[in-house]
Image (tube, helix red, strand yellow):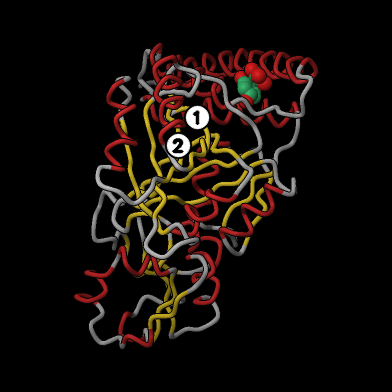
Amino acid sequence: MTLEQLKQLRNEIDKIDNEILQLVNKRAALAQQIGLIKKSNIIYRPEREAQILARVKQDNPGPLDNARIAQLFTEIMSICRALEKPMTVACLGPQGTFSEEAATRRFGGAFTTLPCDSIDAVFRNVESGNAGYGVVPVENSTEGAVGRTLDLLLQTSLTVCGEIQLPVHQSLMALQTDLTKIEKIYSHPQSFAQCHHWLQTKLPGISNTAYINTSSNADAARLAAQDSHAAAIAGKRAADFYGLKICAENIEDDSKNTTRFLVLGAQKVEPSGRDKTSLVMSTGNYAGAIHKLLTPFSVHNVSMTRLESRPSRTHLWQYVFFVDIEGHQKDANVAEALKELNEKAAFLKILGSYPAS
Ligand SMILES: O=C(O)C(=O)C[C@]1(C(=O)O)C=C[C@@H](O)C=C1
């Protein structure tokens, strides 16, 4: 390529950048007007954002792939949303947690994080209005359900307004990279469990008592940054935040390790066209009880994507069942199934309908 060609191509990019600049601002001004029309305080409309992302992915001519296009438009909507009204999202802190990464994936970069030291605190901060939304882990592909989140969902007045699936890659990080110098490892119990095999084979010399549980893996990184004989298992983001070096990456036992997060809020989300509904229910202790609860779904052709039992915490050996189904509670077949379920279940709480991720 000649210098002349390079100059010409850059001139074209400059022209396009100017057009993008005008168009992005034009879009932002329109969003600002929408913000003024919205009577309620609720600016974030998950169903509308999901529809926009689905449309741009469908119309995407390339060469940018759909994941990149979704990332770009998530960011554009994020800044437009922030112009309408700034947003605060509560999630497990300190900075650098997978929860924060999940929040960024959904909301883009234009929001303020409210870092919380527990899942309970995330719920409390959204319930009290300190944060507009919260992001909590609900299940992991290796380790299963996050029990505390399920227990709190049972009690909360909040609704589920979204789900985020985040591939979770764990790294071992420390102030230095010599594994023989490591005497203790900090991490969240779920992260230890996800890396069990790697730890047993690569660091067999570390005694059980040298595995120290922390409330989040970012907190593990923070602690490891204070001790040259300590390491942490956490996401790479945490290493950047706390100035740690990566000793080994992708140490999770399953390379497809994924955590599903829920977005909590105080609003009912309208149908997007591709939704899920989460609910929790209970039944009496008699033969065929669960079968009876599940029949309305098959009768009305509603697919169930998840069924999880959890101790009821009110009576010994009694359980509640967390169910995710395909469709929105306003969809005719889902509405019919839920109506019948309501007549059959001893207890039924709809946690929310939201766009499927
Ligand atoms: O359509 C709206 O309701 C808007 O406020 C605009 C917009 C957008 O940028 O497209 C921004 C925030 C909402 O969550 C949804 C979409």
Relative height, residue 122 to residue 29 (above, below):
below
Relative height, residue 174 to residue 134 (above, below):
below
Ligand 1 lies in quarter = top right
Q: Nearer the viewer, mark 2 or mark 1?
A: 2
Residue 20, percent from left and from top: 60, 16
Relative height, residue 136 to residue 175 (above, below):
above
> Going by the image, does 59 lie left or right of 83?
left
Q: Read off the residue under disc 1.
A: 354
Q: Quadrant of residue 290?
A: top left
> Going by the image, does 340 lie left or right of 109?
left
User: What residue is drawn where x is 55% and y is 67%?
Assistant: 242
Q: Read off the residue under disc 2.
A: 278
Of 328 and 111, which appears nearest the observer?
Answer: 328
Disc 2 and disc 1 in contact, CB within 8 angstroms: yes
Residue 209, percent from left and from top: 37, 88
Residue 238, percent from left and from top: 50, 61
Residue 148, percent from left and from top: 49, 59
**Neighbours of disc 2 within 10 Å: few (<14), some (14-19), many (20+):** many
The first of marks 2 and 1 along the sequence is 2
| The CB of the residue at mark 1 lies under 8 Å from ligand 1 | no
Numbered disc total: 2
The amino acid beneath tag 2 is Ser
Question: Is label 1 in a helix, a strand or a loop?
Answer: strand
